Amino acid sequence: MTQASKSDTVDLLRALIRNACVNDGTVGSGHEHRSVETLTQYFGVAGTVFEPQPGRQSLLHRIEGSDPSAPSLLLMGHTDVVPVNASGWSVDPFAAEISNGFVWGRGAIDMLNVTAAMAVAFKPFLTGETPPPPGDLLYLAVADEEAAGTYGAKHITDHAWDQVGADFVLTEIAYPPIDLGGGVRYPVSVGEKGPFWTHVHSTGTPGHGSTPYGSDNALEPLIGGLASLFETPAVVGITDVWRDFISGLGLDPGLESELLDPDRIDGAIDRINASDPRLATYLHACTHLTVSPNVIGGGVKSNMIPDTAVAQIDLRAVPGQDRDDVDRFLGKAMGRYADRLRFEPQADFAATESRPSGSLWEVIVDACEDVTGSRAVVPTLMPASTDARFFRERGAVAYGVGMFDRRVSFPDFLSMFHGNDERVSVESVGLTVTMLERVLDRWRTA
């Protein structure tokens, strides 16, 4: 890494944060055109712009490789960020100030740091300063990742696959190092859980709120069913990615055995939770069908018995679990209330994963050694979903790659996703662009 690369990445990251491309899930939000303009100015070359809705822009650059038969590689970042409750922040979330060696702001780690670093690593290929790799090299900055990709990656892969299709993809997220007692390891995301968002409906009979005895209140079965969800243990799913992750951490053999055993893993996570709740939350999410009732509504007036009610539930499945597993769990967990409820799927996306092997994986491990002196790379699963799924579904191999220093622990890092005081150290920004530059250099010469 040159100082110019680090400085350019920090400057670009701060500009992207200040663009405040806040995506609240509505069509008119996002305003990703601001960051497309910023990136276009940085590159100095116009790319292909996709705009399925006004302002919801994504930017593509594609460099033709020297060998038409060689595999292509796509660098993909998103430019939208989630909303902010500024009262919970100690700084202006969109000022992108640098304080105590950190760049602060919404999107600093999700994922504008990587989006900026990818742009800086890609630019020398675009300008001709660096010769192209054998296969095509692409840079894609997408809109709408924070709301299922409808106006971003989904739209583009559905309508312009001939332009964005690639054999390999690097995207989010960049994980910090992790050390659970067996030495420092460098996680690389190789898969993600699948969202199975569900609305649960109940019905009743309207009446006056002053005479509730014997009434048919739509909230009763819904609230009863939701209460049962909170009390029902989540379904365990031990995957190959989880086995690779745990086996690579160098844990105490007894703890490793527990974390790989479906019948004992919950007890191990409970013990970890006593000392490190955030880490326990991550370990639980990577190994369970998670269920989080997040929105509930019913009725229209305080003196009317409601005849309809609905709850919105966020369910996330590990690889190997599907809608049938989700529906079975909901039916069993809600028990005697289930017959009075109707389940309406809102989003069904199967979990996706790429095996940690092959040419790009070896390049990533080699690049990690270049940057850190260590080849201790471990594959891991993302509890949330990313745009990688749209490419994996079409056969691409996709990984989430970046690099952090150790100023923020693995658990603290996880707490900043969609949380308060999101920030990334300046040194981490430099490490990420260095890592990506080494990946691209090794990919080009492999």
Image (tube, helix red, strand yellow):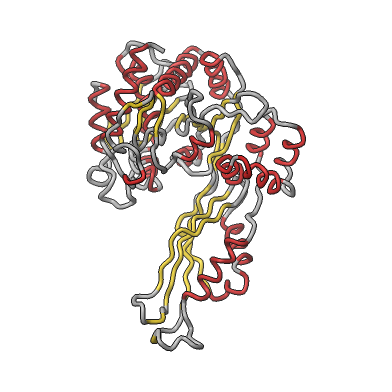
Q: In this figure, what is the number of numbered marks?
A: 0
Instruction: State the residue at coordinates (54%, 76%).
Output: 340
Instruction: State the residue at coordinates (51%, 66%).
Output: 343
Question: In the picture provided, is 124 more to the left or to the right than 259?
Answer: left
Question: In the picture provided, is 77 more to the left or to the right than 96?
Answer: right
Question: In the picture provided, is 177 more to the left or to the right than 431?
Answer: right
* Quarter location, residue 258: top right
Q: Establish if 365 lies above or below 210.
A: above
Q: Establish if 213 lies above or below 203.
A: below
Decide which of 98, 201 is in the foreground and name it.
Answer: 98
Q: Position of residue 313 (x, y in %)?
A: 49, 59
- Quadrant of the snapshot with the N terminus: top left
Instruction: State the residue at coordinates (74%, 44%).
Output: 261
Q: Position of residue 366 (x, y in %)?
A: 56, 16
Q: Establish if 192 lies above or below 311.
A: above
Residue 440 visible in rendering? yes
Q: Position of residue 177 (x, y in %)?
A: 55, 27
Decide which of 199, 295 is in the foreground and name it.
Answer: 295
Decide which of 396, 367 is in the foreground and name it.
Answer: 367
Q: Position of residue 323 (x, y in %)?
A: 56, 57
Residue 167 visible in rendering? no
Instruction: State the residue at coordinates (53%, 74%).
Output: 221
Q: Establish if 208 lies above or below 320.
A: below
